[in-house]
Image (spheres, rainbow, N blue to C red):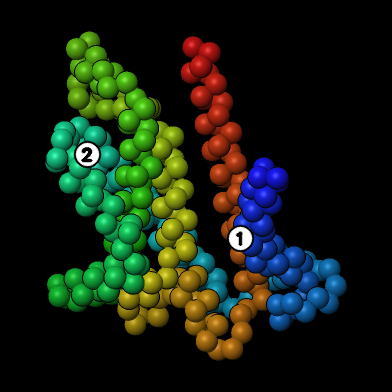
Amino acid sequence: MKKFFAQAYIWLLLAILYAPILIIVIFSFTEAKVLGNWTGFSTKLYTSLFSGSVQHSLIDAIQNTLIIALIAAAVSTILGSIAAIGIYSLKGRKKMAINTLNNIPMLNPDIITGISLFLLFVSFGVTQGYATVILAHITFCTPYVVLSVMPRLQQMNPNLYEAALDLGATPGQALRKVLIPEIKPGMISGFILAFTLSIDDFAVTIFNIGTSGLETLSTYIYADARKGGLTPELRPLSTIIFVTVLILLIIINVRSQRAAKKKEVL
């Protein structure tokens, strides 16, 4: 009975988590403008999304979101990986203190981070727009990359880097040929996590986007909802984003399992 109730609880929890997403996926295949009103199977919303007949503001918001997310994820992956290597090389209280400081931004509410960065940019007289949003997203995403890379460093043989130096490699060569291949799965996971967080973020973006007319997907949805409804094409767009992220996660998990099996064989 304990096993039955445990499994039932897990399936109930998964149903609660994924039911809203499943509803969006189902109603993305109908023409109804109102979510919940099924008017028959149709792919018109997908056709409208890709044919360019949707509002130009939505297309611009999608483009802005992808550009910001790609830049922020790439930069935060580089910075986070370097920071993780630096933290890993520390010892004792210094390492504990830096780890604590890295965890604070993740535990902080997003709105605190957004307001803090907004006040920082205002105090330095930085004009809000693309640059401030990208910088804010890099600041927001970097600690998560550190958290993704750190376990790979802890699993690595600590003598590999020193062995490479003893064999005549320069620090740069040891970094490129020894450390980076070891932490590469963590870097990929960190990049995907940072990319997803950047696309999803609203609180940090809304405080640093300025008044120049720049919109991301999250701010567009917020403004659209305040008008009394959501653009129907957002349903197929949400479905595509969800399926893409799901496929990426499956590929990463499969590759990780294969790599783990190869290490066991060796």
Does residue 7 appear in this view? no
Does residue 98 appear in this view? yes
Q: Residue furthest right?
A: 40
Q: Position of residue 164 (x, y in %)?
A: 25, 16
Tag of residue 17: 1
Q: Position of residue 161 (x, y in %)?
A: 25, 21
* Relative side of 21 to 76, left or right: right
Which residue is labeled 2 in the image? 87
Pick the front one: 20 or 119: 20
Q: Residue furthest front?
A: 1
Mark 1 and mark 2: Cα distance apart in space: 35 Å
Could you say which quadrant of the image residue 17 lies in? bottom right
Q: Residue furthest bottom?
A: 227
Q: Residue at x 53, y 76 (%)?
A: 221
Secondary structure beneath disc 2?
A: helix
Could you say which quadrant of the image residue 18 lies in? bottom right
Q: Residue at x 33, y 57 (%)?
A: 106
**Quadrant in which the N terminus appears:** top right
Q: Residue at x 60, y 49 (%)?
A: 246
Amino acid type of the residue that numbered disc 1 sits on in the rendered structure: Leu
Label 2 neighbour load within 10 Å: few <14, some 14-19, many 20+ = some
Amino acid type of the residue that numbered disc 2 sits on in the rendered structure: Ile
Label 1 neighbour load within 10 Å: few <14, some 14-19, many 20+ = few
Disc 1 + disc 2, Cβ < 8 Å: no
Using the image, determine if residue 154 lies above or below residue 145: above
Using the image, determine if residue 99 lies above or below residue 203: above
* Relative side of 174 to 213, left or right: left
Pick the front one: 175 or 25: 25
Could you say which quadrant of the image residue 122 lies in? bottom left
